[in-house]
Every structure is written in structure tokens, then in C-alpha cells.
Image: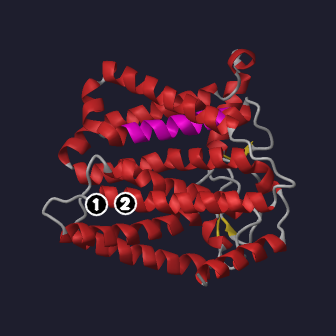
Amino acid sequence: MTPSVAVDSSARRWVLQLPDVLPADFGLPEPVYWVPTLLVFLAAAVALYALGPTVTDWTAPALVPWIGVGAVLHVLYQGPSLSPAVRPLFGNPTVYLTTGATLVLVWTVSELVADARSPGASNDRQLGVVGGGVLLVLLGWSAYLVGVTRQAVQVRPFWPAVALVVGVALAGLCWAVMSLLVPRTVVVAGRTGAVVLAGHALDGVSTALAVDGPVDGFTERTPLSRLLIDVGASLPTADLVGTAWLFVLVKVVLAGVVLVAFRETVEDRPDAARVVLALVAAVGLGPAVHNLVLFAVGGWVRAAPDPTLLRAGVDTAAALAGL
């Protein structure tokens, strides 16, 4: 996912010259990577559309692990772990396409399995379980890679845990306020709306933790977000509440405004509206998860690439394949 906060990294790519809008690391790899991935995504999307997927209020929560998968893959992209042959697939924005293509393929197969079951069966649980399994494997792989370089890296889970608790608490507070001001929106948006609000609240809090808090070594790469932070720094409140509070406020307010704006659409066309809201959630939750993982293993990401690390990964995979 496009990270709000990230360590600088380099890769061979085609950088789009829109520095005032896009993140500094935004750039496509060579066509040999993104063109086939795009074709796979489009083919799977057409097949899924032809099947007429069932989208419920549980679909967005079921997609949360897949958002985490994309975020962790982008963290691995910034570290010394991925083979150069596949690394360009997980840069920004190609990681969106890679994760999306995988998700749509899994969703299509899941829909076929659901159709073979009893009438009205939902594939939400299947999507969530498979996504959760993939995410756990990636997190385990990340822990292994960090363990290989443990002599130079200290894993710090405390501040990511703090950001998670504060972000969820902020989302809960905002949800409670919305239930008083726009109760109909809260009812209609349901779990999908809760995921949208939680994702953007967590993104705001995790970014603020890096900008104003004790997490060092990270920079804000998105120009529009950096502009909000700069505005916050120019206000008299900067010394009291920090510089990122305006960014956090704008994030949660915009998330609430989107939910209010989509209320009638969710009522009239719930399937399409929930898919769009899931994408809105991904724009916030993806960077948030990326930030949390990056905070925990930032020292490993900043470490210089180690060829023995790649060799260890290959040897481990070969050993597992021989079991």
C-alpha cells in the first residue's frame, strides 16, 4: 500500500513527474512486470464480474487481511529480503496491482466454491480465512528475516501497539459521535463504514506518532499530507498538541463525510457501494498497517541488502519443498 510514513528506498522504475501530488517513491517498474500483472487482474476481474459476486456488509472486514498483505509486501520491498527478480512487483504503486490481482483470483475461486454450496452461501469467511493465512505467513517470514539479522536489529512492537490502541479508540469515538449526529448513516454503513473509519483513524494516528512522537527515522512522503502537517506546524497549537493533529482531524472527518455521502448509494446499490467503500478503506488501512510494521522493524528495513540473507531464504524454501 502507499505508505504515509516510510524509509527511503531505490529501485529501477519509471517515475511519474508529478511531485506535488504523488508520493516521492511513486513509479512504475518496467512493463515486463506491470503489464502481465495488469492483464491477470483484468481477466480475473471479468471472470469475477461474470459470476456475479455476493457483496455483503461482511465483505469489507473480510478484505482487511488482504489489505495487510499488501502493506507487509511493501515493507518487505523496502528491506533486504526480496529477490531482485520479483522485487519490482511490490513497489509503489505496483503493489496495489499485484495484491489486487491475487485477491481477485482468490475471490473468483472462492465465489465458485460458494456457488457449489447451499443457496445464498457467502464467500466472506473464505476470503477472510485465506487472506488471514497469507498475512500470517508473510508476518512469519518477516519475523524470520529479522531474526537472521538480529545482531543489528531490535524489534520494537511497543509503539505500534500504542498506535493501534489509540487509533481504534479514536475510531470508536468518531463512530459514537456519528451515531448521535447522523444515526441513519451509521446504521446503513454498518461494518463496512466502521472499517473505513478505523482505517483512516489508524493511518492518521500512526503518521502522527512518527511526526510528533518518539518514532524516529521516518518521513512523510505524500505531498498533500505533508502540506497538512506543515499547516499544523504553523499554527499556535503546534507546541501544545504537535503538528500532525490537523492531518488526523482531516483524515477522520473526510472518512465520515464519505460515509454520509454514500448513504443513499449503499441503500440503492449496496454491492457496488460497498466495493467502493472497501477501496476507500484500503487507502487508509493499507498505509496504517504499513506504518505499524515499519515502526516495528525499521532498523531491519534500513539495513543494507545482505546476499547471505537472500541465500538463507532460498535454502529455507528449498528445504521446505523437499519435505
Q: Is residue 203 magenta?
A: yes
Q: Is residue 317 magenta?
A: no
User: Which image quarter is the C terminus in?
Assistant: bottom right
- 258 left or right of 143? left
Q: Which residues are magenta?
A: 194-208
Question: How are the colours assigned in the image?
Answer: secondary structure
Q: Residue 50, position in %: x, y?
A: 24, 73
Q: Which residue is mark 2?
A: 127
Q: Which mark is residue 123?
A: 1
Q: Mark 1 to mark 2: distance in Å? A: 6 Å
Task: Write the residue at 76% across / 44% down.
Answer: 218
CB atoms of marks 1 and 2 within 8 Å: yes
Residue 77 falls in image quadrant: bottom right
10 Å crowding of disc 2: few (<14), some (14-19), many (20+): many
Q: Residue 280, position in %: x, y?
A: 43, 47
Residue at the outermost front position: 323
